[in-house]
Amino acid sequence: MNEKPTQFKPAPWYKHAWVWFIIALPASAVVASLYTVYVAYQHPPQVIAKQNKFQLKND
């Protein structure tokens, strides 16, 4: 009868895997958007000075 009740000590928030999974989802979206902006600035669209009109042949 002299047993001590066991006390449950929850782990810190950073030791739970689901926390990192939930943080990783928006973080990956931010990284992907920054990469998209980088690629867009490195390879801007080319301006076409003269427009050629092509006619399709009707067979």
Image (tube, helix red, strand yellow):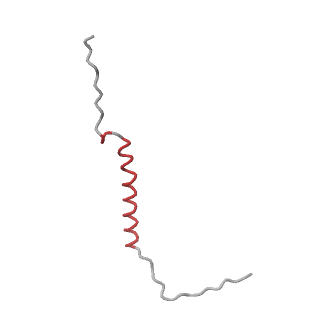
Residue at 37% over, 73% down? 41
- The answer to whether residue 4 is above or below residue 19 is above
- x and y, in percent, of residue 46 in the image: 45, 80
- x and y, in percent, of residue 10 in the image: 30, 33
Question: Which residue occupies the foreground of this view, 47 or 5?
Answer: 5
Q: Quadrant of the N terminus?
A: top left
The reply, left or right, for residue 58 in relation to residue 10 is right
Q: Quadrant of the C terminus?
A: bottom right
Residue at 38% over, 42% down? 18
The answer to which image quadrant residue 31 occupies is: bottom left
- x and y, in percent, of residue 27 in the image: 36, 54
How many numbered badges does the structure rendering display? 0
Question: Which residue occupies the foreground of this view, 28 or 57?
Answer: 28
Query: In the displayed image of the protein, which residue is found farthest to the right?
Result: 59
Residue at 37% over, 59% down? 30
- The answer to whether residue 50 is above or below residue 24 is below
Question: Which residue occupies the foreground of this view, 19 or 32?
Answer: 19
- x and y, in percent, of residue 51 in the image: 53, 87
Query: In the displayed image of the protein, which residue is found farthest to the bottom?
Result: 50
The answer to which image quadrant residue 9 occupies is: top left
